[in-house]
Each structure stands twice: as structure tokens, then as C-alpha cells.
Amino acid sequence: MFSFDGYKAIDLSPRVSPRINRFDGSIEEGATDPYGKHWVMWEGRFPMDNSLFTMYAAPNDINLYDGRQNDDILGQERMTTHNGSHIQGGKGHISHWKGVPTDMKGLWELPLDTFIGEAAVCNLDHLKPVEVIDQSDYPKEYTKRKFFQLTADPGDMRGQEILPDHLDNIQKGDIVLMTSPFKGLEQPWLSSRTVDWLIKDRAIKMIGFGYPGIEWQYDLKVAAPKNSPIRRMFLGANIPIAHPLVNIETLSSDRVFYYGMPLNVPKLEASFVRAVAFEPQNQEDDA
Amino acid sequence: MIDLKGKKIIDLTVELIARVTRIDGSVEVGTTDQYGHGWLSEETINEQDGTMEHLVGANQGTVAEWPIGALSGHMGSHIQLGVRHNDNWTELPKGMKGIWEVPLDSYYGEACVCNLDHLKGESILPEHLTSVREGDIVILGSCWSGEDQPTLIGETARWLAEEKKIKMLAAGGGPGINWETDWDAPEPNNSPTHRAMTGNNIPILYPLSNIDKLSKERVFLISLPLHVERMEGTWVRIIAIE
């Protein structure tokens, strides 16, 4: 019998605290997810058995049974499958981009064992930001004092490129969980050459990113097919991406068992996910 | 490290194909769940990076078959506990919890597979569930639909909850079992299965499919709720490993 006996479950999904409009007219305030997105719900009463339930993505001024509706926040912001921790595949998400592979799959077309199995934990806290000497090669530079100054000044601190040497605990066919304690422009960043290695040499089956921690979403506005190179490479290779994850840095083992299944809703380009790592409680016994 | 070598994963989740309104306005029809509810999605462009994302639900009145537009956490295969769901009923015990308040290991473990094909239209009694062990997740299924489904009566639900102290109730649906009775009886005699399970902090998982595909009497089941506090029921992906 398969079992998690002897393993400790560590939640990798940030807890979502929704804003809930209660049936009695009261409002319980929530908090945003790590990306600042709201999760807003309405409470309704099921008249058949007098039970209560909540509704996701309730638009403004709906009238559900006897529920109270009118939510300024939700009226301004529809919610997507990308709220909270979620997993995304290529089909339906980037399949309209120029230059993506024609055999790119949707989440619902990938085998179930894509989302479960041994994972390499890559906590890159040793990749400390470095001082820019001459010109920065950081992929996400912002305009500084003048609009034409697109690169960092000497002396500014920037995150390091993540290289295969930094990922030597990744085995072929792994799920990869990656994070660091750094934020903003000091986050280590994934380059195309390293992702190429992850795909071709390590043949990873899924990747999960902590947030903040790793810079992987850059060149978003560059003309296709050079836009969003990291997302394009992973999803183009049918390697789904789970994010934002938390607690990766609390994992004491560099190898864990990961579980994070998407919902069984074909055609969804992304899905909410509950991601959990199972780590051996006695790692010497497990070695 | 545990691994999946030699193991088979069986998806017990009811598939719910999304009804998608594409960016060009075309609509792809989806499927509905056991209650007739569909998953509504609407494509939108994320202006930050040009990716396509699905808005969940629809604007009120724009989908004729579901004018409410919003989606309930009780749609498709889902999991529920009592707080904020039925703790508004009278005479429920104190100490009931919400799905966000119980440990993660409440949602996985050894499961006893009870295929009740031989109980067409009959009540499910403790004597039909002799393979259930204390602390099990209990999977109840049958090949029957509608009125022919076996029914989990209150007495048996209480026996499962209080004597066998089961960890989770997982009920197949359409085909499967009818797991609730007396839902419209006056309180406190209403919905005895809801009361027995949520009153004892035993999550209810419903509906499951593919129970008939399980070849073992005992399997490992995983079904984690979304990590959303104060949400009384959430959509889940249910898998068995055998």
C-alpha cells in the first residue's frame, strides 16, 4: 500500500483569505494573494436544506437565492484561474502566441503523474545579489532617472543568473521546486540556457516557483517569438508551471515528494491547486 | 523516498468540461455536474504579458442556462465540512470545524472500497460494510443511478461516524449512492448523514467517478481542498493510488 507514513506534510500553497459577503449582509474582509489579487465570494443559502455555501467570481448585482450582493471590489475586478497558487499549461494560455510548438498540451491532456512525484528542492539562498561592475545583464531592468537609462548603474545590486551548477540536486524526470529569499531585482533569475538544460538534459516534468524568490517572468512586452522566453520554453515543452508557492525554504530535505493536481476541468488553461510537499521525518532512515 | 513505481493512479474526479467563451465571442459548450451546474469560463487577455487567462464564472444574465454567473464551491467533485455550511442548523455538536481548520492528513490515507452493486434500491446497512476498518476513508459506489441507487440511511451514517470513526466519506454519484435522507425534515431530524459526518468533523467528498475501475478493496486516496479559509466547500481533484 502506498503511504505517507513517516513523512511530514508541508503546505506549499499560500492560504487565501477571501473577502466574503455574508448572507446576513455583513462583510468579512480578506487579504490578497502574494501577487495582490483578491479572492472574493458571496454567501448564499440553499433553500432545499437550509445549508450555506459560497460562490466564486460572483459579478456585481447578482441575485442568488436570498444572498446579499453588491461588491465594489468584485465589481471592479473579475477573478481568474490564476488567483492564489495555481498551475498553468500551454494550450489555451499561450497557444495564440507566434512560434509556440503545435504539439503543446493543455493541463487536462497531461498524464496525472506529471503532478505528483519526487521533487528536487532548490533553495538558492546562496545566490546572493552581486554588485554591477559595468553593465547589468539582469533581464528585468527598469527605467531609472531618465527614460533612456535602461540599465543599472555600477554599484547597484542585482540577482545572479541561475546556472546548471547551482541545480546539481536535480535528477532526470524530477519535479523542481525553486525559491530564494531575495526580492525584486535581487532575485536570482532563470536564463534561457539554463531552462534549455532543465528541459533537454534533466527532462524535468514540472516546475514550481516560490514568490518572491526567482525571476522568470521577463521580456513580457518583447515582440513574439522572443517574448516571455521562460514561460514559452517550459510550456512549449509541456512542463507545467505552479506558482506562487510558499514554504519551499522551510523544507529541510533537498528531495521531497510533491503533490499538486489541477482540477479535472478540461479546457481550463490554468487551475487552482493545493500544492503539498511530503518530506521524510527521519531523513537518515530515508537515505 | 516513496515513489510511484509499480503503482497505478486512478482519477476518481468527475470530469467537468468547461463552457468557454472564447476571446472572439464564440462559445464552446461544456458539460454539467450532477446538479446540472457547469463550469463557466471566459477568455481574457492578461495585458501584462499577453497571455490568455480564464475568468471564472460569467457576468450575471449572460449565460442563459446559469444566469447567476458565479460558481459555487459545491460544484463538480468537491469536499465539504460543517463550519459555514450547516453549522446554522440546530442541535449540532460544539467543536465543528471548517475544511481550512483540520490537518492536511485529514484528506489522504487508506481507503476501503465498498462496491454496492448488489444493493439495487436498498438501504445500506452496517452489515454491508464489514470491510470498513476504524479510521478508514470509506468509498461507497454502485452501478446504479437515480432511484435504483443504494441509500446511506442515517443509522448507518452514524455507525460509520461514531463507531467506525471513519476519516472521510467518499460517495460515488451518477451512478453511485444516495448518501443523504430526510433533507427536508424538521430540524434536528434533517439530513442525518450531513449531521453525522460534519458533526464529527469527517469531510464529505462527492461525487466520485471511476470507483468501478478500482481493482483493489483497499487503496490510498488523496483529495486536498483548496487552501482558502472560510470556504465551506471546495472543488477537488480526487485520486486513488493502488
Image (cartoon, helix red, strand yellow):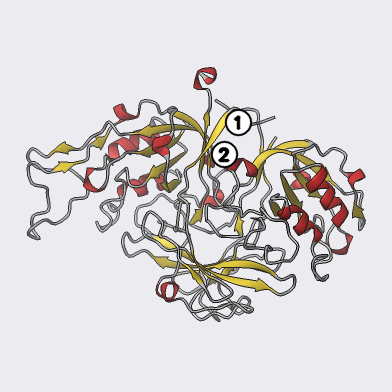
- Write down the quadrant of residue A125 in the picture: top left
Closer to the camera, B112 or B176? B112
- Picture coordinates of residue A49, whole percent (x, y): 74, 70
Q: Horizontal placement of B171 versus B58: left or right?
A: right
Amino acid type, callout 1 = Leu
- Write down the quadrant of residue A44 in the picture: bottom right
- Picture coordinates of residue A247, whole percent (x, y): 42, 41
Closer to the camera, B216 or A212? A212
Q: Secondary structure at mark 1?
A: loop
Crowding at mark 1 (Cα within 10 Å: few <14, some 14-19, many 20+): some
Q: Are marks 2 and 1 in contact (CB under 8 Å)?
A: yes
Q: Secondary structure at mark 2?
A: helix
Q: Chain of mark 2?
A: A
Quadrant of the snapshot with the C terminus of chain B: top right
**Residue identified by numbered label 1:** B4
Q: Which residue is rendered at x = 19% and y = 44% of the image? A: A138
**Residue A113 numbered mark, or none:** 2
